[in-house]
C-alpha cells in the first residue's frame, strides 16, 4: 500500500502555509502602519541611556556543557527506569539484571568523568 | 518477545557487546592503573578483538533476525564482522608507535576505536533503517573525535571540525531520505519496504526523491564524487592510523548497508539507481584518478586514489541491476583486497612519521629502498595491489569488477575503468620511482617498530595470497550474499 497515509498530510501543509502567511502579514502590516523615526539613542542596544562598553564578540567559557551532558545521561536513565519500574512485577529477573547492567554502564561514565576532573570547576 | 528469546538475541550480538565492554574496560583501566606506556591497553583491546572474532565465528552458519527484525545475523554479517575486527586489530598495531611518537598516548584512543568498530558491525548487520542509522552514527561520532585526537595539531582539529560539520549535514540528508521512503512505503524494515514496492508499479515522484537523498547520504559516507570534497582534507589532517581506519572501515560498512538497502528494499527501482550509480561511478573514477595525479602529499594522493577505488567498486553496484549475484560479490571481493592494500600503504607512511614530521610527502619517501629495504618492499606490494598488478590481490579485485560489468552488459563502464587504471599507473609507479631511484634525503628516517612491521607484513602476505589463490575468497564473498539475494 504505497502512499496510503501520505495524502493525510495535506492539512499539515495547509496549516504550515496559513501560519506562515499570518506571521508574514503581521510583520508587513506593522511595517506599513507604524511611524519610523530612528535616531542614534534609539538604536543603541540599551535604550535606557547607558553607554555600551566593549565588543559583543567576547569569549565565553562554555564550561557547563560537561555538566549538561552528565545531567542528560542521568535524565535519560530516569526516563528508562520509569517504564521498567511500572512493569517490574511482570518481567522478572532478566529485566532486573539488564537494568543493573545499564546502570553500571552509566555509572562507569560518571566515574570516568569524575576521575578525569570533569566535576572540578576550574577557570 | 519473552526473556528466552531476548537472551538468545543477546548472545547473537555478543561480538559487538564484547567490543563495547572492552572499550569500557580500557577507559576504567586507564585511570585505575595509570601507566606511562599504554601497551597494556593495546593488549586488552587486542584480547577483546580476538574474543569478538571467536564469538563471531561461533555463529557461523546461523541465519536469524534478532531484536524484532532490527539486525540480521547471516553470512554477510559474519563476513563483515571479521573484516572489521581485522581492520581494528591492524589499526591497533599500527597506532601504538605513532601515538607515542606524536605524544598523544591516551587510553581513550583505543576505547574509541573499539566503539567505532562495534558501530561498523551494527551498521553492516542492520536490516532496518533504524539500526543502520544507529551504527552509522556510533561510528561517525567516534571518528569525529579520533580525527581531532592530536589536540596540539591545528590540522587535526580542522579535519575533525570539517568532518563533523559535513558528516552531520550528510546524516541529515540521509535521514530526510529515510523519512520520505518511510512515508511512501509505510515501513522502516528493508524487506517490508521491498515487499510494498514490489506490489505496485506506480511509484510516486516523492519515492524517487527519497531514494536520491538516501543515495546522497551514502555517497558522502563512501566519499563518491560529487560528495568527496571532505575526504582529502580530513584524511590529510587526521592522525595517519585514524586515516587508515577511516579509509577502510566506514567505507566498507556503508557499502554493505547500501547493498542491503538497494538489493532488498529498493530493488524494484533498480533502473533508476542503476542509472544514477553508473554516472557517479564513471565520474568518481575519472576525477579521483586525475586529482591524484597532481598531489604533492602522499597522504592526499592516497585519499584521491581511495576515491577512485570507490568508483571501481561502484561499477560492481551498477552491475547488480542485471546480475545481482556477481555484481555484489565483486564489490565485496574488491573491498576485501582494497582494505588490505590501502591500510598497508598508510601504514608504511607511519614508518616515516617522527616527532615534528608527519612523514607524508614524496620527500620523506626518497631513497627508502636504500635506507629501509623492508619498508620499501612492503610499500611496493601495497602499491602494486592498489594499481592492480598480478600476483597481488588488487588484480583479482579489478578483474572481477570489470568481468561483472561485462557480464551485466555495461561495457562502456568497464572501458572507463580500464582507461583509468592505466592513468593511475603514473602516480602509483611514481611512488616506486621515488623510493628506489632517488638518493635518500635527510628526511628519510624510518622508525623501528615491531608491532607496525608485524601488522604490515601480515597484510602484505595476505594481499599476495589473495592474488595467487583467490578462489577461497570469492567463494566466501558469494556465500555471504545468499542472505540478501
Image: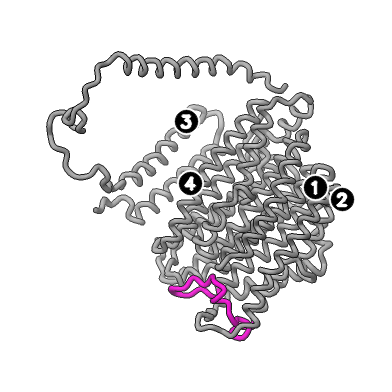
Asked which secondary structure carries label 4, the reply is helix
Q: Do labels 1 and 3 share a chain?
A: no
Number of numbered callouts drawn? 4
Is residue B382 depicted above or below A28 in this figure? below
Q: Where is residue B359 in the image (x, y as percent from the top left)?
A: 52, 72
- Viewer-closest of B203 and B248: B203
Whether labels 4 and 3 belong to a single chain: the reply is no
Residue annotated with mark 4? B165
Q: Earlier in the sequence, mark 2 or mark 4?
A: 4
Query: Can residue B357 be found in the magenta stretch?
Result: yes
How far across and how far down the image is residue B7, in percent? Answer: 63, 42
Give the CA separation, mark 1 to mark 3: 53 Å
The chain letter for the residue carrying disc 1 is B
For disc 3, the chain is A
* Residue bearing the label numbered 1: B319
Residue B409 visible, this orientation: yes
Amino acid at each position: 500500500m504505497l502512499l496510503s497515509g501520505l495524502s493525510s498530510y495535506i492539512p499539515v501543509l495547509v496549516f504550515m502555509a496559513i501560519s506562515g502567511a499570518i506571521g508574514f502579514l503581521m510583520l508587513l502590516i506593522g511595517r506599513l502602519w507604524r511611524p519610523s523615526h530612528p535616531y542614534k539613542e534609539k538604536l543603541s542596544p540599551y535604550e535606557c541611556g547607558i553607554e555600551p562598553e566593549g565588543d559583543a564578540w567576547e569569549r565565553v567559557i562554555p564550561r557547563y556543557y560537561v555538566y549538561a551532558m552528565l545531567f542528560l545521561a542521568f535524565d535519560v536513565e530516569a526516563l528508562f527506569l520509569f517504564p521498567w519500574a511500572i512493569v517490574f512485577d511482570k518481567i522478572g529477573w532478566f529485566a532486573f539484571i539488564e537494568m543493573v547492567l545499564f546502570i553500571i554502564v552509566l555509572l562507569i561514565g560518571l566515574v570516568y568523568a569524575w576521575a578525569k576532573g570533569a566535576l572540578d570547576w576550574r577557570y | 518477545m519473552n526473556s528466552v528469546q531476548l537472551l538468545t538475541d543477546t548472545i547473537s550480538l555478543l561480538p559487538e557487546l564484547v567490543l563495547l565492554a572492552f572499550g569500557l574496560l580500557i577507559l576504567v583501566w586507564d585511570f585505575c592503573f595509570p601507566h606511562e606506556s599504554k601497551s597494556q591497553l593495546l593488549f586488552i583491546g587486542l584480547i577483546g578483538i580476538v574474543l569478538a572474532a571467536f564469538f563471531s565465528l561461533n555463529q557461523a552458519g546461523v541465519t536469524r533476525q534478532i531484536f524484532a527484525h532490527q539486525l540480521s545475523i547471516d553470512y554477510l554479517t559474519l563476513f563483515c564482522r571479521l573484516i572489521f575486527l581485522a581492520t581494528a586489530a591492524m589499526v591497533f598495531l599500527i597506532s601504538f608507535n605513532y601515538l607515542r611518537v606524536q605524544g598523544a598516548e591516551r587510553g581513550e584512543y583505543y576505547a574509541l576505536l573499539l566503539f567505532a568498530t562495534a558501530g561498523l558491525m551494527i551498521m553492516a548487520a542492520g536490516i532496518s533503517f533504524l539500526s543502520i542509522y544507529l551504527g552509522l552514527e556510533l561510528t561517525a561520532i567516534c571518528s569525529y573525535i579520533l580525527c581531532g585526537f592530536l589536540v596540539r595539531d591545528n590540522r587535526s582539529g580542522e579535519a575533525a571540525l570539517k568532518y563533523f560539520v559535513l558528516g552531520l549535514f550528510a546524516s541529515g540528508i540521509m535521514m530526510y531520505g529515510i523519512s520520505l521512503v518511510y512515508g511512501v512505503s509505510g515501513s522502516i524494515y528493508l524487506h517490508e519496504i521491498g515487499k510494498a514496492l514490489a506490489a505496485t508499479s506506480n511509484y510516486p515522484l516523492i519515492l524517487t526523491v527519497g531514494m536520491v537523498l538516501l543515495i546522497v547520504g551514502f555517497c558522502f559516507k563512501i566519499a563518491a564524487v560529487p560528495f568527496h570534497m571532505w575526504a582529502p582534507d580530513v584524511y590529510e589532517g587526521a592522525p595517519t592510523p585514524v586515516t587508515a581506519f577511516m579509509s577502510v572501515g566506514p567505507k566498507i560498512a556503508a557499502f554493505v548497508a547500501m547493498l542491503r538497502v538497494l538489493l532488498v528494499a529498493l530493488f524494484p527501482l533498480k533502473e533508476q539507481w542503476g542509472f544514477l550509480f553508473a554516472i557517479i561511478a564513471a565520474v568518481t573514477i575519472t576525477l579521483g584518478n586525475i586529482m591524484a595525479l597532481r598531489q604533492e602529499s602522499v597522504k592526499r594522493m592516497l585519499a584521491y586514489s581511495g576515491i577512485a577505488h570507490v568508483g571501481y567498486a561502484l561499477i560492481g553496484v551498477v552491475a547488480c541491476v542485471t546480475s545481482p549475484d556477481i555484481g555484489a560479490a565483486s564489490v565485496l571481493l574488491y573491498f576485501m583486497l582494497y582494505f588490505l592494500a590501502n591500510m598497508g600503504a598508510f601504514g608504511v607512511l607511519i614508518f616515516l612519521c617522527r616527532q615534528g614530521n608527519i612523514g607524508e610527502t614524496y620527500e620523506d619517501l626518497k631513497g627508502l629502498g636504500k635506507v629501509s629495504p623492508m619498508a620499501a618492499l612492503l610499500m611496493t606490494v601495497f602499491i602494486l595491489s592498489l594499481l592492480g598488478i598480478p600476483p597481488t590481490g588488487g588484480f583479482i579485485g579489478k578483474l572481477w569488477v570489470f568481468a561483472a560489468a561485462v557480464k551485466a552488459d555495461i561495457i562502456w563502464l568497464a572501458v572507463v575503468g580500464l582507461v583509468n587504471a592505466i592513468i593511475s599507473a603514473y602516480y602509483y609507479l611514481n611512488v616506486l620511482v621515488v623510493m628506489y631511484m632517488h638518493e635518500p634525503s635527510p628526511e628519510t628516517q624510518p622508525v623501528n617498530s615491531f608491532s607496525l612491521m608485524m601488522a604490515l607484513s601480515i597484510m602484505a602476505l595476505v594481499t599476495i595470497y589473495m592474488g595467487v589463490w583467490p578462489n577461497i575468497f570469492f567463494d566466501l564473498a558469494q556465500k555471504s550474499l545468499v542472505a540478501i539475494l
